[in-house]
Image (spheres, helix red, strand yellow):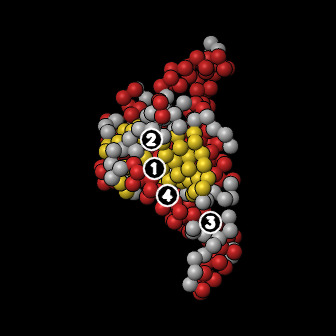
């Protein structure tokens, strides 16, 4: 696929998705939101891609939503069905917000694990993005901010729903209410990221190695782990147990299982089909 705001590549079963507006600190304008969803659909549907890594070009991961996109939204909504009716204009705005939410929810819907590799700024919409990823890692120069409060907004595309489940309600409330910056080391303490590396080069080298580790795992089982953990987050334990029983009744007896058992017996590395 061709992208204008992303740089996408597939090498050795690892898909790299790089936010590619470095001259604007990878600010997320409308095209980037749409292309992120397209990239997640591509990752999900491409059998040879087993893991995705999202990173940012230039000095920063992302400065969040492009403010130019916000300032132009009112005129677009009025011209596109709102007219002089407040009710219709607000309905249109609601649909725009729901669509933006869906672009990031596509990361969760993608069956493959998606890793966020964060350096420099990750603010506003960037927090929404990384919270939808399966795993988050950063470099020491990274900083995070739920910045919406400082521009008069309530974060509305995922942060307030996902962040409390990652770092706890109290910490999430503090970050959302204050908009304060959190450095890479503190992000690790808060469990917003799994690990903080010394610099960007070390981070990206570690992500390549880690992604390769995941890519070598049985694909069906890996996809099942993602499905079950995401499902369990939003359901009771009993619901989760019932669902995983149904999943394994359908997926357990696979060529992946046969290959894993054979590789164990023969003391060799397993090779799984895409």
To which residue does mark 3 refer? 219
Q: Are discs 1 and 2 less than 8 Å apart at CB?
A: no
- Nearer-N-terminus badge (3/1): 1
- Nearer-N-terminus badge (4/2): 2
Separation (CA) of disc 4 from disc 2: 17 Å
Q: Are discs 4 and 2 less than 8 Å apart at CB?
A: no
Q: Position of residue 181 (x, y in %)?
A: 32, 39
To which residue does mark 2 refer? 61
| Residue 176 figure quarter | top left
Residue at 60% across, 56% down: 11
**Mark 3 or mark 1, which is nearer to you?**
1
- Where's the C terminus, which quadrant? bottom right
Q: Residues within 10 Å of mark 3 (few under 14, many from 20)?
A: many
- Nearer-N-terminus badge (3/4): 4
To which residue does mark 1 refer? 117
Separation (CA) of disc 1 from disc 4: 10 Å
- Nearer-N-terminus badge (1/2): 2
**Mark 4 or mark 2, which is nearer to you?**
4
To which residue does mark 4 refer? 208
Q: How crowded is mark 1: few (under 14 residues within 10 Å), some or many (20 or more)?
A: many
| Nearer to the camera, 12 or 47 | 12
Can the viewer see residue 111 in this picture? no
Residue at 63% across, 38% down: 3
- Nearer-N-terminus badge (2/3): 2
Can the viewer see residue 4 in this picture? yes
């Amino acid at each position: 696929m061709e992208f204008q705001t992303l740089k996408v590549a597939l090498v050795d079963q690892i898909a790299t998705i790089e936010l590619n507006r470095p001259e604007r600190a990878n600010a997320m304008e409308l095209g980037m939101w749409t292309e992120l969803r397209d990239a997640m659909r591509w990752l999900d549907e491409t059998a040879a891609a087993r893991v995705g890594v999202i990173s940012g070009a230039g000095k920063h991961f992302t400065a969040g939503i492009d403010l130019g996109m916000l300032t132009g939204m009112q005129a677009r909504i009025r011209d596109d069905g709102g007219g002089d009716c407040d009710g219709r204009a607000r309905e249109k705005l609601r649909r725009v917000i729901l669509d933006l939410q869906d672009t990031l929810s596509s990361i969760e819907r993608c069956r493959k694990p998606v890793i966020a590799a964060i350096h420099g700024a990750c603010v506003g919409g960037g927090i929404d993005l990384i919270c939808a990823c399966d795993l988050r890692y950063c470099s020491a120069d990274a900083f995070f901010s739920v910045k919406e409060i400082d521009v008069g907004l309530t974060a509305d595309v995922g942060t307030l729903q996902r962040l409390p489940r990652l770092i706890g309600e109290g910490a999430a409330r503090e970050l959302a209410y204050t908009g304060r910056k959190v450095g890479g080391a503190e992000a690790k303490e808060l469990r917003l990221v799994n690990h903080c590396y010394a610099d960007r080069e070390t981070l990206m080298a570690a992500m390549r190695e880690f992604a390769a580790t995941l890519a070598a795992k049985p694909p069906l089982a890996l996809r099942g782990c993602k499905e079950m953990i995401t499902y369990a987050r939003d359901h009771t334990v009993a619901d989760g147990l019932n669902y995983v029983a149904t999943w394994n009744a359908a997926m357990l007896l696979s060529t992946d299982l046969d290959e894993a058992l054979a590789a164990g017996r023969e003391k060799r590395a397993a090779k799984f089909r895409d």
